[in-house]
Image (tube, coloured by chain):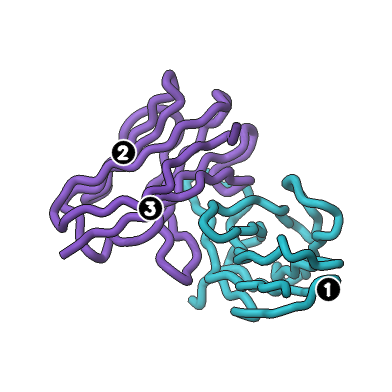
Chain colours: A purple, B cyan
Amino acid sequence: QKEVEQDPGPLSVPEGAIVSLNCTYSNSAFQYFMWYRQYSRKGPELLMYTYSSGNKEDGRFTAQVDKSSKYISLFIRDSQPSDSATYLCAMSEPGSSNTGKLIFGQGTTLQVKP
Amino acid sequence: DAGVTQSPTHLIKTRGQQVTLRCSPKSGHDTVSWYQQALGQGPQFIFQYYEEEERQRGNFPDRFSGHQFPNYSSELNVNALLLGDSALYLCASSLLDREGTEAFFGQGTRLTVV
């Protein structure tokens, strides 16, 4: 069993839809939770970063962490074609900060159709 | 600021050969991490360098080695290449364990082993 599980998709939605992306994990010691966006032929870029449980909002993006269920989510409101990319969840190894060893999910490919 | 730069962008090698990939970190960063991203998978942590020393290592064989130079740039070396080493190799730079900061990724080097 992988430490971090993520549905690879692909996920296809119409423009303007609300998108929900999710990851589950097995290691209850994870403390830092991140969402990265990766466009084709590019490196990942950090979207959201959360320490421990709770919600964090940034514009159209909301990240949620439920440590009791070992479940994290990323919500994208009013999705745009420019949001079409692969979304990777990542967690840092216990004892590391968000810039230490990161453990990634498989990535979910999202396509937003005009 | 050029961000994280990696070279070369693409590389084709023959099984059994050796390869060296290079990374220049973002200005002001002192830590470099290397990841391997197979097609359709999330990045996997190879190792992290700080102050010219390997600080953390993932589950990769000794064929994978690295180096960090006094100017913080880094090299990843892979010996005795296998077909399974074909992947996108990503470099990420950061400030060591500085909470609230982030790791910035380069665009990666696409390695194909034939």
Label 1: element kind: loop
Which residue corresponds to the image point at 55% horizontal and 31% vertical from the top-left? A30
Pointers 3 and 2 in contact (CB under 8 A)? no
Q: CA distance from mark 1 to mark 2?
A: 44 Å
The three-letter amino acid code for the residue at tag 2 is: Lys
Which residue corresponds to the image point at 43% horizontal and 19% vertical from the top-left? A68
Mark 3 or mark 2, earlier in chain = 3
Which residue is tagged 1? B18
Left or right of residue A101: residue B18? right
Which residue is tagged 2? A56
Query: Where residue B97 sits: x, y (%)?
Result: 61, 46
Q: CA distance from mark 3 to mark 2?
A: 11 Å
Which quadrant of the structure image shows residue A75? top left
Image quarter hosting the C terminus of chain B: bottom right
Left or right of residue B23: residue B40? left
Q: CA distance from mark 3 to mark 1?
A: 35 Å
